[in-house]
Image (spheres, helix red, strand yellow):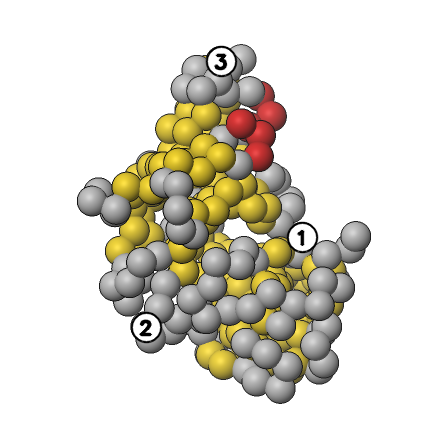
């Protein structure tokens, strides 16, 4: 079982470059999420998609865009990368969101450095 | 709004000693509570969750947590630490109201196990 798959695992960018982080889940989950993890900050929600066709901003959306391509895939795009976006990015999915007792399942992360 | 506070960003215990990781939450509605574990260079894995019913919840790897509504706490314990328990642990809350799709995480507690 692959679960949640993120690509790439590592990436180095220069300031101003753009890139897309890919995420796919094979659990037929409705909801998908993008988080960033920074030392001492825990995980902070960037964007989420409660169901196919919908996306909403989380706690820290500035500088990012997302696309829910289909039920399986949820991508995160950095249009013009900034050093402050250096972080570890995690994609997660759950059967459903919204005050749910369903746990989220996480990918292994993308480690992104912006010079 | 919901929030999570984990007391102690770093906890050290001796192998075989009791593990106690503290988590307090705030929520305007009955919460769903989760503990996740993160091993180095990996994503988060669910340890256990509280939804409704029994307030003492057992999880994987010998961990358990007790939901105490009066204390708004959900502390994680394990009777005897093992070297393999060294990791970072995150408490998270899911509750209703504004931003109800969000799973709010604490900032994490890094557990070190001393041989």
Disc 3 marks which residue?
A: B16
Residue B95 - label: none
**Picture quarter containing residue B103?**
bottom left
| Circle 3 crowding by C-alpha within 10 Å: few under 14, some 14–19, many from 20 | some
Please report the residue visible at 40 percent of the width from the left and 51 percent of the height from the top.
B52
Q: Disc 2 to disc 1, how far (Cα)?
A: 30 Å
Q: Which of marks 2 and 3 is in front?
A: 2
Most foreground residue, B23 or B62? B62
Residue B97 - label: 2
Residue A3, placed above or below residue B15:
below
**Picture quarter containing residue A86?**
bottom right
Let me know if residue B88 appears in the view.
no
- Residue B56: percent from left, percent from top: 39, 36
- Residue B57: percent from left, percent from top: 44, 38
Chain letter for mark 1, please.
A
Please report the residue visible at 33 percent of the width from the left and 52 percent of the height from the top.
B4
Residue A4, placed above or below residue B83:
below
Residue A56, placed above or below residue A29:
below
Q: What element carries label 2?
A: loop
Which circle's residue, 2 or 3, is located before the other in the chain?
A: 3
Q: Disc 2 to disc 3, how far (Cα)?
A: 42 Å
Q: Which of marks 3 and 1 is in front?
A: 3
Most foreground residue, B74 or B5? B74
- Residue A28: percent from left, percent from top: 71, 68
- Residue B86: percent from left, percent from top: 54, 29
| Circle 1 crowding by C-alpha within 10 Å: few under 14, some 14–19, many from 20 | many
Q: Which residue lies furthest to the right in this view?
A: A1
Disc 1 marks which residue?
A: A108
């Amino acid at each position: 079982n692959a679960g949640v798959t993120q690509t790439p695992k590592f990436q180095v960018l220069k300031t101003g470059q753009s890139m897309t982080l890919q995420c796919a889940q094979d659990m037929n989950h409705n909801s998908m999420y993008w988080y960033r993890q920074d030392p001492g900050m825990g995980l902070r929600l960037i964007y989420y998609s409660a169901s196919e066709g919908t996306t909403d901003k989380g706690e820290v959306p500035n500088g990012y865009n997302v696309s829910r391509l289909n039920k399986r895939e949820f991508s995160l795009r950095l249009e013009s990368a900034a050093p402050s976006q250096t972080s570890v990015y995690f994609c997660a999915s759950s059967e459903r969101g919204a005050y749910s007792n369903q746990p989220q399942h996480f990918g292994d992360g993308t480690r992104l450095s912006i010079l | 709004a919901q929030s999570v506070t984990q007391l102690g960003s770093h906890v050290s215990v001796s192998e075989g000693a009791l593990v106690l990781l503290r988590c307090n939450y705030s929520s305007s509605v009955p919460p769903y509570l989760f503990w996740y574990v993160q091993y180095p260079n990996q994503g988060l894995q669910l340890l256990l969750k509280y939804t409704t019913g029994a307030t003492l919840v057992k999880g994987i790897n010998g961990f358990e947590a007790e939901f105490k509504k009066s204390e708004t706490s959900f502390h994680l314990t394990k009777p005897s630490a093992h070297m393999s328990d060294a990791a970072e642990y995150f408490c998270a809350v899911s509750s209703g109201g504004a931003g109800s799709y969000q799973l709010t995480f604490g900032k994490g507690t890094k557990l070190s196990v001393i041989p």
